[in-house]
Amino acid sequence: MSTSPVHPAPRRSLWHRIVDWFRGAPTTAPPPPPPPPVPLVEVVYQPAGDGTVSTALCKGDVFEFQVHTHLVWSTREMTYDDLTTQAAEYSSSAQDTVRERIWKVARGFSPYHAAQAEEEMQKALESDWCYSGVRGKVRCAARVRVLPDPRVREHLLPYARQELDVEANATLGGLRAARFEAMILRWRKLIETLGHEAVVRYAAQLTDRPFADVVTRYGEDRRAAVQELVDVLGQASRDHEHVGLYEFADAYDQAVQAFRKQMGLDEGSHLPKVDS
């Protein structure tokens, strides 16, 4: 494959070179400036584990919060390996910064309020901070997890168990009420469908004894209620006949017959007939 010959740049004449020399013009073009360094992508490093555990006195200076601190390191100026090296170098200083920020927060909370203390401590650590070294700048952020003093947890254990019992009993009571309501509606619908005739009570004994007992008591209660109402109406009918109000007496007598028919009873077999 043939290539075209490379022609050298034209040489300036001697006269032009002498003029350039007197003017101080450079004989060659200056080299171009070096390109800016390519920025690295952000790398993040968080040590594994439960974090460093430190203590902070609660309100009253008797009990302590157990504070688990998790440090998160990031940078755009070095590689991941260099970042881990820098994190190990500045870790002790970062832990001191965390303790300084959370110490005053912990003093404002009761030993029983670990969750609220954790929330406020996290607010105190919202702003991160930086460290500068020979490899570049690294940024540090912290997250905390706060646990109560073991002595406080032991003290609260009986009350926590009582709270669980109350909650469990309330849940069980609600479940029983819902089941009871469903059963009542189902049985009421069944009894209303079957009716309260004597044959129903006898037939129920062929299927389920408890159900037969319920139906029997239900029928007896209704019979007693009707008997009481018939007695009242009978007395009212006699009173109106005594004073000559025969139309009212007849109306009461018709009401008695209607109740007897509703109960499915013969007029003279189960309920007493109203005397005229």
Image: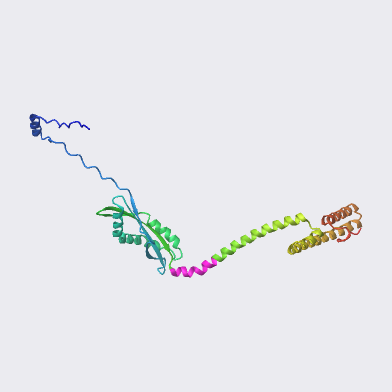
Image quadrant containing the C terminus: bottom right
**Residue sticking out furthest to the front:** 1
Q: Quadrant of the N terminus?
A: top left
Q: Where, by quadrant of the figure, is residue 185 drawn?
A: bottom right
Stretch of the chain drawn in magenta:
150-163
What's the residue at 39%, 59% (across, down)? Answer: 144
24 relative position to 160: left or right: left
Observer-nearest of 231 and 19: 19
Vertical relation: 89 (above or below) 36: below
x, y (%) of residue 48? 37, 59
Q: Nearer the viewer, residue 74 or 249?
A: 74
Residue 263 vs residue 125, the one in the foreground: 263
Q: How many circles with numbers are drawn on the protein?
A: 0
Residue drawn at point x = 67 percent, y = 60 percent:
180
Q: Magenta includes 151?
A: yes
Picture quadrant of residue 31: top left
* Protein image colouring: rainbow
What percent of the width, then of the height, locates residue 77?
29, 50
Residue 100 lies left or right of residue 23; in this view the side is right
Residue 17 sits inside the magenta stretch? no
Viewed as shown, does residue 176 lie left or right of 127?
right
The image shows residue 120 at horizontal and vertical percentages of 41, 58
Where residue 222 appears, as percent x and y from the top left, is 79, 60
Q: Is the magenta stretch mostly helix, strand or loop?
A: helix
